[in-house]
């Protein structure tokens, strides 16, 4: 029996929202270790990459000076809800992961063309929405610090990541509807 999907707004704390987003990709005993931080507690340049209302695709491309490629590592479909775990890398640098993320999409809020392109897995989510001129608003809700060898980083195969990583959880509204919920972690900002 499928687990009912909740909205980020249903969760009073970030850890519960993070666990809910990770649920399709983890075992029952998964505990998402993280610390909630305020935007002014995020160091430079991670703060510039996370504390904004823009698409990570655009921000990462500007910061790294190259378009970013998406690798869908794992995906789950339950009715109209499509969830995927991804890595983003600058074009031509497949070994340099600049973002790890999970996106949960309510496909009812997206046009057939947009859905088809997202499910084709050739472009990052933000690039698809921009390309199709979807009216969108990105609303970060929580900012987090993750231990480098913690369970969330291990979920992406990054268990040997040195130091801490910073990320955010939020909602992308498409044409006024809360269509997409995301967890985004930035990496390799100093190399």
Image (cartoon, rainbow, N blue to C red):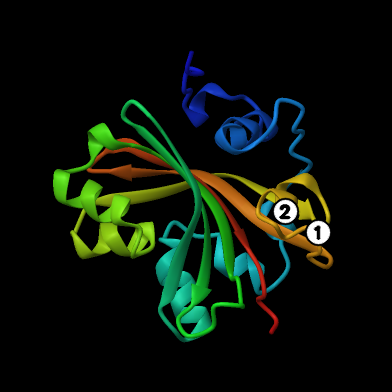
User: In the image, is residue 81 above or below residue 174?
Assistant: above
- 151 lies left or right of 125: right
Q: Residue 170 placed where, x, y %?
A: 50, 44
Q: Is residue 73 left or right of residue 108?
A: right
Residue 6 location, x and y as percent? Answer: 48, 23
State the residue position of label 1. 148
Residue 53 versus residue 25 in the image, above or below = below
Q: Residue at x 84, y 65 (%)?
A: 163
Residue 187 appears left or right of 128: right
Quick one: label 2, few (<14), some, or many (20+) residues within 10 Å? many
User: Which numbered disc covers residue 184?
Assistant: none
Secondary structure, mark 2, is: helix
Q: Disc 2 and disc 1: Cα gap in Å?
A: 6 Å
- Residue named by callout 2: 153
Location of residue 173 (image quadrant): top left
Neighbours of disc 1 within 10 Å: few (<14), some (14-19), many (20+): some
> Could you tell me if the residues under marks 2 and 1 are in contact, i.e. CB atoms within 8 Å?
yes
Residue that sits furthest to the left in the current view: 112
Q: How many marks?
A: 2
């Amino acid at each position: 029996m499928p687990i009912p999907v909740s909205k980020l707004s249903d969760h009073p704390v970030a850890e519960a929202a993070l666990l809910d987003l990770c649920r399709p990709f983890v075992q029952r005993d998964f505990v998402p270790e993280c610390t909630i931080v305020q935007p002014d507690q995020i160091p430079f340049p991670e703060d510039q990459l996370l504390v904004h209302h823009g698409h990570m695709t655009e921000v990462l491309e500007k910061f790294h000076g190259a378009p970013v490629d998406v690798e869908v590592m794992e995906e789950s479909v339950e009715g109209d809800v499509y969830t995927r775990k991804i890595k983003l890398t600058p074009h031509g640098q497949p070994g340099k992961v600049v973002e790890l993320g999970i996106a949960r999409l309510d496909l009812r809020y997206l046009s057939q063309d947009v859905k088809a392109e997202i499910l084709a897995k050739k472009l990052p989510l933000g690039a698809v929405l921009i390309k199709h001129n979807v009216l969108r608003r990105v609303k970060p809700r929580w900012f987090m610090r993750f231990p480098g060898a913690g369970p969330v980083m291990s979920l992406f195969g990054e268990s040997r990541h040195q130091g801490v990583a910073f990320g955010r959880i939020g909602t992308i509204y498409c044409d006024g509807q809360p269509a997409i919920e995301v967890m985004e972690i930035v990496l390799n900002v100093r190399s």
